[in-house]
């Protein structure tokens, strides 16, 4: 499998705060990467740099052969390849579920409305809520809203999908339904980068675990080794905290 | 509320029976009264037309002025600040006089009373509209821009389909306020001779010499007009569901 994301030694500062200090990461096509680490460690910043939501200061990011250089062209090409699911869902509250899903395909991908609706129904069925198509986000549960958000990114037919703590804002009983959809997506061969602390999900689907702390990647390992016998002390301490709470 | 209103009207009417009030000038049971009332009401056309045209222009201009305020570029933000500060600092009456008497000389154009009034009112109001839109747009969560980014919407589509529909819903009460304000401020264009409600009343006062009665009718005309508009704005707010 070819390399689809190449992050090379990137740094990112917010004022005086160094959020990323020379991070490098390779992701192959179809690979499922799970990033974990304490809050403020730079996990979200890293994936937000990959799709251009944050501008990095030094280093290079290449996605599917396109160098991200903040020019309008490279940014729009990279945006079209990458979908993203947020912790807070970020659905459009004034639009119905169907309108949320078809807005991107119609406006950005220039699809005909009827084709966009068909596509949206297909993905709503895949996230198992086709019956909610004409409701507004506020009428749905958190788990349903997050599944709509996943379907919305899928409607753009990206080659890569980024998850930024997709279950952190959910009630415990709704986490499962979202993880099931994500697992199903993982088995379909989609390239995924997930920032999450869901260790069960990580063990099941991850090809590669990445542990970040203080703006650096501290450890990269296969899930088996990562959860049982990590090399670094910091990673071991973090796992102790999240596994035995 | 309604009872109080009726009580006030009756007090005014009855007090006129004993003192030196002269309700005959606007008494609807006499021919003269009817003619005078119709004369007063004929100003309604220009009051409404001026206000509506001016508010439409000021909303469009206000929106265009608001957008640079949200830019990261300091120069663009400066343009917005400059416009808002300058326009907000000029009293409406002064602006009306300047546009009608001064602008034709400066620009070498002829401008009729109607457009002078509309332009002055719209210009003056646009600074306030711009501030309202800026506040509304800034109140929309950052996540909405980020979600639009991830589904590849460009700036115009993001504004048009995602940000503005939410922002406008939130500022609808404030926009309604501006419309009411505009209806009231339109009375000022009477000074350059536009034939709206206040001008008609002034003219009738000159011929009948009964200012109290005529201006009381004028007060009632504005009151009814504005209560109707307020009800309309409220209906619109409910229909659009401010919080959906």
Image: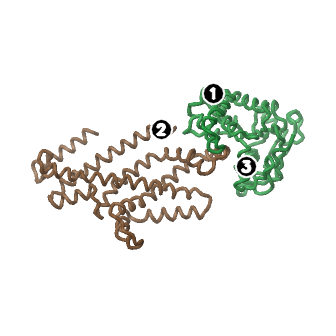
Chain colours: A green, B brown
Please tell me how crowded label 3 is: few (under 14), some (14-19), or many (20+) other residues with Cα within 10 Å: some
Identify the chain of the residue marked 3, using the numbered disc in the image: A
Q: Nearer the viewer, residue B71 or A110?
A: A110
Q: Nearer the viewer, residue A218 or B37?
A: B37
Q: Comparing marks 1 and 3, which lies closer to the viewer?
A: 3
Q: In the rendering, which numbered label is found on residue A130? A: 1
Q: Position of residue B176 (x, y in %)?
A: 41, 48
Label 1, label 2: how many angstroms apart (C-alpha)?
Answer: 25 Å
- In the rendered image, the vertical position of residue B153 relative to residue A114, given as above or below: below
- Is the C-beta separation of discs 1 and 2 under 8 Å? no
Which of the 4 image quadrants contains residue A130? top right
- Is the C-beta separation of discs 3 and 2 under 8 Å? no
Label 1, label 3: how many angstroms apart (C-alpha)?
Answer: 30 Å
Give the secondary structure at mark 3. helix
Which residue has dot 3 on it? A77
Q: Please identify the quadrant where the C terminus of chain A is shown.
A: top right
Give the secondary structure at mark 1. helix
Identify the chain of the residue marked 1, using the numbered disc in the image: A
**Residue at 19%, 58% in the rendered image:** B204
Label 3, label 2: how many angstroms apart (C-alpha)?
Answer: 37 Å
Q: Position of residue B79 (x, y in %)?
A: 54, 64
Which residue has dot 2 on it? B241
Do marks 1 and 3 both belong to one polypeptide chain? yes
């Amino acid at each position: 499998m070819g390399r689809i994301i190449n992050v090379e030694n990137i740094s990112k500062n917010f004022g005086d705060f160094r959020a990323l200090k020379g991070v490098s990461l390779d992701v192959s096509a179809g690979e499922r990467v799970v990033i974990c680490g304490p809050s403020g460690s730079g996990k979200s910043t890293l994936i937000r740099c990959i799709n251009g939501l944050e501008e990095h200061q030094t280093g290079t990011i290449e996605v599917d052969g396109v160098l991200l250089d903040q020019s309008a062209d490279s940014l729009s090409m990279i945006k079209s390849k990458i979908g993203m699911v947020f912790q807070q869902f970020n659905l459009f509250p004034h639009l119905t579920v169907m309108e949320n899903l078809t807005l991107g395909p119609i406006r950005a991908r220039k699809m005909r409305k009827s084709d966009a609706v068909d596509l949206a129904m297909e993905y709503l069925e895949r996230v198992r809520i086709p019956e909610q198509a004409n409701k507004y986000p506020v009428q749905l549960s958190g788990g349903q809203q997050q599944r709509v958000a996943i379907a919305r990114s899928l409607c753009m037919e990206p080659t890569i999908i980024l998850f930024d703590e997709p279950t952190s804002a959910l009630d415990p009983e709704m986490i499962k339904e979202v993880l099931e959809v994500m697992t199903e997506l993982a088995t379909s061969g989609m390239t995924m980068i997930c920032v999450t602390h869901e260790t069960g999900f990580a063990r099941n689907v991850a090809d590669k675990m990445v542990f970040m702390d203080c703006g650096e990647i501290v450890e990269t390992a296969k899930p088996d080794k990562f959860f049982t016998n990590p090399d670094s002390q910091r990673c071991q301490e973090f796992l102790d905290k999240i596994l035995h709470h | 509320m309604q009872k109080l209103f009726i009580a006030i009207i009756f007090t005014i009417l009855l007090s006129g029976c004993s003192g030196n009030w002269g309700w005959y000038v606007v008494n609807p049971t006499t021919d003269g009264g009817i003619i005078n009332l119709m004369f007063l009401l004929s100003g309604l056309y220009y009051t409404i037309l001026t206000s509506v045209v001016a508010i439409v222009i000021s909303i469009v201009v206000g929106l265009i002025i608001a957008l640079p305020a949200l830019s990261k570029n300091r120069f663009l933000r400066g343009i917005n600040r400059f416009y808002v500060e300058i326009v907000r600092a000029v009293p409406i009456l002064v602006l009306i006089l300047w546009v009608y008497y001064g602008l034709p000389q400066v620009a070498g154009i002829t401008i009729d009373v109607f457009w002078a009034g509309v332009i002055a009112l719209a210009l003056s109001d646009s600074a306030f509209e711009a501030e309202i839109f800026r506040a509304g747009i800034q109140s929309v969560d950052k996540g909405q821009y980020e979600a639009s980014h991830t589904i590849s919407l460009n700036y115009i589509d993001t504004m048009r389909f995602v940000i503005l529909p939410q922002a406008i819903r939130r500022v609808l009460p404030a926009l309604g306020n501006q419309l009411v304000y505009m209806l009231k401020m339109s009375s000022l264009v009477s000074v350059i001779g536009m034939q709206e409600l206040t001008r008609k009343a002034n003219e009738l006062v000159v011929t009948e010499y009964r200012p109290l009665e005529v201006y009381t009718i004028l007060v009632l005309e504005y009151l009814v007009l504005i209560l109707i508009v307020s009800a309309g704005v409220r209906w619109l707010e409910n229909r659009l569901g401010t919080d959906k």
